[in-house]
Image (cartoon, rainbow, N blue to C red):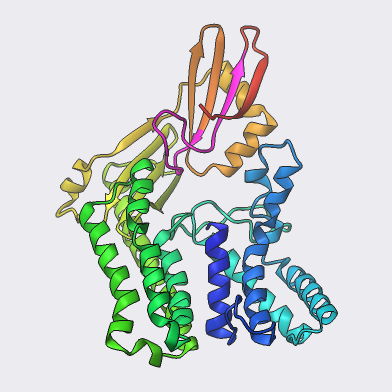
Amino acid sequence: MDTITHGIAGALIGKAVFRGEDMLASHPMNRGRIVTWSLMLGAIFPDADVLRDIFSHDRLLVITWHRSITHSLVLLPVWALLLAGITRGFANSRKWEAPSFLVLTGIYAVGVLSHILLDLVTSFGTMIWSPLEWSRPAWDLIFIVDFTLTAILLVPQLLAWAYAHPEKVQRRVMGMWLLFLPAPFLIARIGENAGAPISGRVVLSAMLILGGIFLLPALLGWGVRIRHGTWNRAGFAAALMYIACTAYAHHVALLRIQRFADLFPLQVESIGALPLPPSLWRWDGLVRTDRGVYELRMDLADKPRSDGELLTLEHHYFPDALPNSYIEVAKRLPEVQRVLWFSRFPVTRFHKEGDVAVVEIADIRFVQIRRDRPAAFTYRVRFGADGNVLSQGWATR
């Protein structure tokens, strides 16, 4: 999950569950504002591990370090205690009214836990048991950047802020609506570039829904009667319902790809159903066999009427290159072994560029964003005519 959505989720939890107040309220810093700030900071803290990338030349940190100890359930109490101590000391120095150290520890624990869980539901993998065990569990429920979930988390907070002051409702509501109006167009453009086009009907529907959410409570007069906490609790409940819907959709998609593998039949080494943007209905079914990876793009709205129809759906096969000495040497390299440890659906490719032999390891679970560039997390090793390694690293072109 992206860091911005983590922060939005933390702020919502602070307001919905712990009676926090708006972080940017006009009144002086008080207990309620500190609660919300602490939940938000706790929710984004685990991504602080990316700071190590700035000072390191190791390009594999994104798979060996990111989402490790700062995302660990084992070390969560340590981070909560540390953050609570810093916050309590800072609040005391500014003479702010703040929750007790014990309460702050619990608040930060919830914030960090929300980050871990929201990363765990994506397909990237999160090392939740580090440093005791270096595995990468992934629940495959939500795409790494999910605009729908972000909106569900953010919009109720904006509505609570807008309707908190009746004399400012019109200006605030209209401003937010105009700000969000182009969002469906921008998301559609992003989806098109990512190979996940969004129809004009969906874009229009999203615009109408956003207009209704922002404007109807003001036009009908009941928006100001809803309490600040009620807006936020409704948003929190809606987010939980959305995640529950993704769990059900994942279950359906996984059953479909398992049925596809059984009917083919395929010798399955690993199998998964991964979310695709932009909706709950689009999934990427992947099956790793001993010779390559099969991919079945699925739209759950189009249910096959028979097993025969399921087999006729368009699917792709990504074969492994035939074994050779270059591939064998490449797979013995420590860096490539780390890449293979990270990859869930790896495909090995081989080609020659003159006298240079090129070995690539591509993880098929990551969508190719641009057709003129390799898919994300494609690792490339180049060998000279003498068999020595000329270069290695993530492929960028």
Q: Residue furthest bottom?
A: 225
In the rendered structure, the answer to whether residue 234 lies left or right of residue 86 reads left
State the predominant SS element of the stretch in magenta.
loop
Say how many tags the image has.
0
Q: With respect to residue 12, does 258 lie above or below?
A: above
Q: x%, y% of residue 99?
A: 73, 86
Identify which residue, 80 or 363, lies in the foreground: 80
Q: Residue at x 45, y 44 (%)?
A: 365
Q: In the rendered image, is residue 112 in sight?
A: no
Q: Residue at x 54, y 30 (%)?
A: 396
In the rendered structure, the answer to whether residue 242 lies left or right of residue 164 reads left
In the rendered structure, the answer to whether residue 192 lies left or right of residue 131 reads left
Q: In the rendered image, is residue 222 in sight?
A: yes
Write down the region rendered in magenta. Answer: 362-383
Q: x%, y% of residue 144?
A: 48, 54
Q: Is residue 239 magenta?
A: no
Identify which residue, 187 or 344, lies in the foreground: 187
Q: x%, y% of residue 30?
A: 69, 86
Q: Residue at x 41, y 35 (%)?
A: 370
Q: With respect to residue 2, does 112 lie above or below?
A: below
